[in-house]
Amino acid sequence: MFLVKFAPAMTDPQRKDSFFKLPRSLNGLSDPNETWDIIEKRYDQDGVAVACRNRDYRICLLVDQKNSVAGLEYSVRTLFLLFVWIAKILIDYCLRLKQFR
């Protein structure tokens, strides 16, 4: 099992959705309350299927035809990506200014 932290303290003060376990295989899951539903089969293209925990699309498992975990697929909010992009532009600009001094 792997543990994943997914939410900052301010959005999840009780820490109910901040951490959850990722199985190494979909066979014989230890927690009966957790279900990993296969939502998309991409065996022809990638050789994997996408399984998400309780229809939570923040992080999904890529599983092969034997239900072993082959990788992860996760989502990021667009606003966060915009912030990262703007920060990168500002850092690059500051570095260029420093070069020409």
Image (cartoon, rainbow, N blue to C red):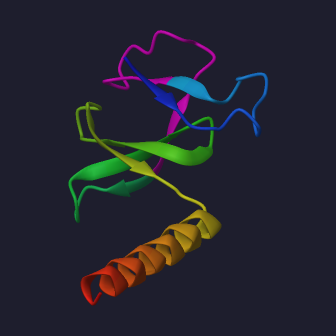
Considering the image in quadrants, where does the C terminus appear? bottom left
Q: Where is residue 58 in the image (x, y as percent from the top left)?
A: 56, 47
When the figure is inspected, residue 56 is found, relative to residue 9, above or below; the finding is: below
Look at 54% across and 12% down and name the residue there. Answer: 31
Residue drawn at x 75%, y 33% as measured from the top left: 12
Q: Is 69 in the magenta?
A: no
Q: Point out residue 39 in the picture as x, y percentages from the top left corner.
A: 50, 50
Q: Which residue is drawn at 36% across and 79% down?
A: 92
Tell me: residue 17, above or below residue 98: above
Of residue 98 and residue 91, the one placed in the foreground of this image is: 98
Q: Is residue 58 left or right of residue 99?
A: right
Q: Quadrant of the N terminus?
A: top left
Q: In which quarter of the image is residue 32?
A: top right
Q: Position of residue 7 (x, y in %)?
A: 63, 38
For this orientation, the residue located farthest to the front is 101
The image position of residue 25, as x and y in percent, is 32, 24
What type of secondary structure mainly makes up the magenta span? Answer: loop
Span colored in magenta:
21-39
Compared to 20, does 75 lie above or below? below
Q: How many labels does the image show?
A: 0
Q: Relative to the observer, which residue lies in front, 67 or 89?
A: 89
Q: Residue at x 62, y 35 (%)?
A: 54
